[in-house]
């Protein structure tokens, strides 16, 4: 069982509940220590509910007193705080598991990548949608050329958070840090990193150039909340991506479609245990967890119960933690297909910076020109 510490992720945090539930699902992780909130009451209640053995009232206390006692520390604080916290953790020789986004820009992510190597520590980043068994199944089928060469990949992630109001006509309560844009718009740090990560994960390819439009359409002032961009991959495939928080009617409309020489696929996050597959003969079928020709999704590790009983978001997170645990146990090199590192986060943030730059320049931007 792995001894884990947590920074952030208190009981008033949605992401905290998701991570802690995932950690507890398969019994491989034990929460030893935490500093869950700067609010003393929330911090104490979180430690009790999350069954943490040791509670710290400050980051400094955590860093000094937990050094050498933990297998890894999970960072669940707001994105703008990640760089300083992770920098300090690596300086104290902790392995780190960071909630996305690793940092606010690619320069910070690249510095953390170097620091992790110098400190001989592991630095993981969680992108939970890749934990869905059917996303992994699609990836396996693409690798085996089931659809032929992929020519087009479309990923959309619409949400309504910045556009809807309550019964009194008031906007929803939004964390202050999400109302500010940084070197990269916060909506890209929040949703765009998932879209980019899924594209890399499925095609095992990088973006070479992008052209984009960023807009403000919602009720949160002075923030980009809508992003749409076209991308060319190194392989020549075309990507069509859009995401944002101003799309009324969508809680989380993540949808992925891919079109190849011999076939196509479509997956929707609200129906995660199945996807649609078509071939060049005009035949269409549904692939689900009971299909006989599964490659990846039929493995026992995903079968917590019988097919037909929906799995979902928390299970996907738990799958990621199983992968991270395997890496920590066997000291694997960074070739594990299902774990993500600082270099993956750096690449994604560099690509999203190119997207942001293209929106301002109104022209195609090469990703390699945005390294500095």
Image: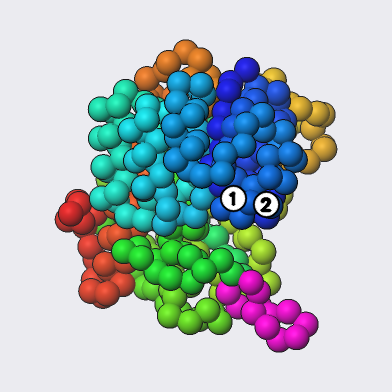
Q: x, y percentage for residue 275?
A: 65, 44
Q: Is residue 112 left or right of residue 301?
A: left
Instruction: Classify 10 Å Cα crowding around label 1: few (below 14), some (14-19), many (20 and above).
Output: many
Residue identifier under label 2: 42
Residue in the image at 68% along x and 83% along y: 170
Residue in the image at 78% along x and 82% along y: 167
Is 152 in front, or is 216?
216
Quick one: label 1 or label 2, which is nearer the N terminus? 1
**Residue 174 in view in this figure:** yes
- Which stretch appears magenta? 162-173
Quadrant in which the N terminus is drawn: top right
Q: x, y percentage for residue 257?
A: 53, 52
Res 48 quadrant in image: top right
Instruction: Name the mark on residue 37.
Output: 1
Q: Quick check: marks 1 and 2 in contact, CB under 8 Å?
A: yes
Residue in the image at 25% along x and 50% along y: 107
Residue in the image at 36% along x and 48% along y: 83
């Amino acid at each position: 069982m792995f001894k884990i510490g947590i920074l952030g992720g208190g009981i008033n945090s949605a992401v905290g509940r998701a991570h802690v539930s995932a950690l507890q699902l398969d019994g491989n992780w034990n929460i030893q220590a935490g500093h869950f909130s700067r609010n003393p009451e929330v911090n104490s209640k979180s430690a009790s509910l999350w069954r943490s053995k040791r509670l710290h009232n400050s980051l400094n206390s955590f860093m000094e007193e937990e050094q050498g006692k933990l297998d890894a520390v999970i960072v669940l604080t707001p994105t703008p705080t990640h760089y300083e916290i992770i920098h300090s953790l690596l300086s104290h020789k902790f392995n780190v598991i960071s909630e996305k986004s690793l940092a606010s820009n690619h320069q910070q992510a690249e510095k953390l990548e170097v620091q992790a190597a110098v400190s001989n520590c592991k630095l993981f980043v969680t992108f939970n949608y890749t934990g869905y068994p059917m996303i992994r199944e699609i990836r396996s089928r693409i690798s085996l050329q089931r659809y032929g060469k992929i020519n087009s990949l479309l990923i959309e992630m619409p949400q309504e958070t910045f556009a809807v109001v309550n019964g009194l006509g008031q906007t929803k309560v939004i964390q202050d840090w999400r109302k500010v844009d940084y070197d990269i718009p916060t909506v890209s740090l929040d949703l765009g990193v998932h879209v980019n990560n899924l594209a890399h994960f499925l095609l095992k390819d990088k973006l070479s150039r992008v052209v984009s439009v960023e807009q403000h359409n919602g009720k949160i002032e002075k923030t980009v909340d809508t992003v749409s961009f076209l991308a060319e991959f190194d392989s020549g495939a075309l990507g069509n991506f859009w995401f944002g928080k101003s799309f009324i009617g969508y809680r989380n409309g993540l949808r992925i479609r891919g079109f190849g020489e011999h076939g196509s696929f479509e997956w929707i996050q609200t129906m995660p245990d199945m996807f649609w597959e078509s071939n060049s003969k005009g035949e269409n079928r549904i692939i689900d967890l009971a299909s006989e020709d599964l490659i990846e999704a039929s493995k026992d590790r995903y079968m917590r119960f019988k097919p037909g009983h929906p799995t979902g978001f928390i299970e996907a997170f738990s799958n990621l933690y199983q992968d991270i645990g395997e890496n920590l146990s066997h000291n694997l090199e960074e070739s594990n297909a299902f774990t993500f590192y600082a270099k993956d986060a750096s690449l994604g943030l560099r690509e999203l910076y190119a997207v942001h730059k293209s929106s301002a320049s109104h022209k195609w931007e090469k990703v390699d020109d945005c390294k500095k």
